[in-house]
Amino acid sequence: MKQPWKTALTFVIIGTALLPANLPALAADTTQTTVAAPSNFGLTDSIRAAVKSVAIETTAGGTRIGASVRLYNGGTQKTRVPDHQLHVRTTGGVQYTLKASAANKAALEPGEIGELVYMTVIEGTPAIKLSELSFVNVDEYVYPKKETNLLTIPLGARQVWYASAAGADKAAEPKGWGEAFTIPGLNSSLRYTPAAIKVQYPISGASAGASGAPSGGASAGAASGGTSGGASVSETGGAAAAPNGAAAASGGESGAPNGTPAAAPNAAGEGTGPVALVTLLVENPGVGRETIPEFRIDGQSENKTYSGSRTEHGAVTVEAGEKKYIHYAIPVEHNVTLTSLFVTTTETFVSGGGQGAPTTATGFDVGRVQIAVPSGAKTDTAPAISYRIGSPIVFDPLNKMIDANTEVTLMEMHLHESDNGFHSVVAKFRITNKSDKPVPVPAFQTEILGGDGAAYAGARQSGVATALNPNMSYVMNYSFNVPKTEDGKQLTIKLLDTQSAAPYTSTIASLQTAASSEASGDTFAMYPFDLKIVDWTLSATTPGSMGGLIYSYKISFTLEVKQSDNVVVDQNFSRLYMELVDTKGRVLGTAEGSFTGPNKLATGKQILTFNAKTEQLENPFTIRVYEAFDTPSGLAKRYITTLKQ
């Protein structure tokens, strides 16, 4: 829980805090101070005061008014905060007295800065606009009681947060999308820039694409491992097509106004409904390390507010001159369009505690910055760039998944018509370790945007190596199911970080390219191999059993295999997969050959036996040839060619 009382004995790090009246200007470069210090006023000869935050909100118990005031002792000795009540006055002249938090300090050490918190709840919901705040000394031991005004501070238009108001009437500092800002009222020089917003669903189970339990012995240059899959969704809020062609499950409960989360939590504590993931770029322009202060990002639709939370757990520090991303997940309702984001902090008021009684902490929120969300919320940390297949991929330089010594290249991307009523896209990536030590194989996921902007989730091959040795390459396959209307001529393939904002994904590269057409003939590529079927024959055999003839089939073919690059080929690599099809188009059986192991496919004569059994000798047959690999959603196939008798 955020502590209601903050102190700082070193004045240099105050940032937006108070300045004593007689303190000379600091010699530091003022161009780095982007947050104007709040106006401060003399409360006593040595104590100065400034308004940190004031908030008004309609609650079930009435209208709540909360205030936080920052004090600074510029004297040379410990000084008592004068006895006082805190009064606020409306533009109509109505005055309210706020109760002091039980955690408010009674005295300040020399050079100390602290915050005093006050709150009251008024029955009913009067329309309140505040104009000023006053420290008032009240002598209740005379009749009538005597009130002495110690200090009155005028309240500006942006100093009061009207939480229950609509849109701009909330009175937060307005910012446009992509516009850098600091957070008013916080002792921090960190600058933030909204970088991306994407509506998606949390990945169930482990992070998609993360390495799992080993699936076998180490291959030549890489240790083997398993993976788990997951679906992402489109940036505009619609679910991406799941790998089996169905839409990703939505689930979750509808959100409620005033910050109530929209998604029902699952067993892991994560929501199951749609979530708007907001990415902020954080930059430290100062000269020392800073910890990101506690705040959250809330989303505002036309008539509701949705409360968000940071996906990074624990303290996040930013070194001087460093830039990094932080992420906020905002559960929303289905088909909701967010128009604004609010940077919100929470003040804590403590009541009770007298004579050994327990204390009760109550938080009230204060909106600091209002960010306009662009139409359709189509933003990303990695804008799509034109890409030529076979060239190294340029990643977001701030991504934490692909280091500078790991090169990723899209080597193939093919589209073909599936026998299940949709088209299949298969993408093959080469990962190269250019360092002098083993590195983990990056566990990125993928997503394809069709020509119409619809997004489709990729299914990654199930078996993936966990590590890659120096100066070696590894191949990973991804499969996508897309509608038959997709021609593959204008595709955008996105590489997604599944770890930084888990269980959500963020884009680290976005490539505009087109799917390749399959070459006709008997020569074809299965990177890193170039294959050629020189000749082939299909034969039928029967054991001649007493119960009748049962025919089985095998294909004998002469194969030429050439490996083009130095790429690790392990037991997870694609297989040559064949389907035996009769004259009616029915698949009677399949056969497959591996490129690893004792019976691996190599140059020369090869024999594969189909698992087909027929009671009558069928003829003629068609053999469809595929490249195939396993995914968490089942077998993925890439069509290569057709052999006809």
Image: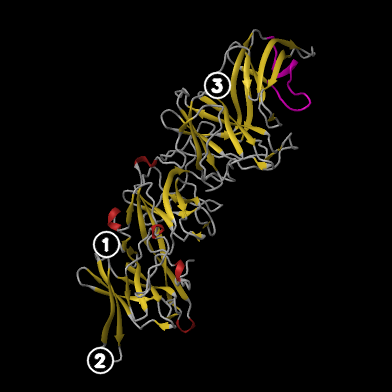
- Left or right: 294, with 341 as reference point: right
Please say whether residue 625 is visible from this viewpoint: no
Kind of residue indicated by mark 2: Tyr
In the displayed structure, 293 sits above or below 592; it is below
* Residue range (magenta): 591-617
Give coordinates of residue 349: x percent, y percent: 41, 71
Does the stretch in magenta take in 73?
no
Asked if the residue under mark 2 is in contact with the one under mark 1, i.e. CB atoms within 8 Å, the reply is: no
| Callout 1 crowding tier (Cα within 10 Å): few <14, some 14–19, many ≥20 | some
Q: Which mark is residue 157?
A: 1
Q: Position of residue 243 (x, y in %)?
A: 54, 33
Residue assigned mark 3 = 419
Residue lying at the far left in this picture: please name it.
92
Q: Residue at x 46, y 22 (%)?
A: 487
- Residue 619 appearing in the image: yes
| Residue on which the image places disc 2 | 143
Q: Is residue 197 above or below residue 431?
A: below
**Of helix, strand and loop, which one carries label 1?**
loop
Under circle 3, the secondary element is loop
For the residues labelled 2 and 3, the Cα–Cα distance comes to: 94 Å
Assign a secondary structure to mark 2: loop
Please identify the quadrant where the C terminus is shown.
top right
| In front of the other: 413 or 350 | 413
- Alpha carbons under labels 3 and 1: distance apart: 64 Å
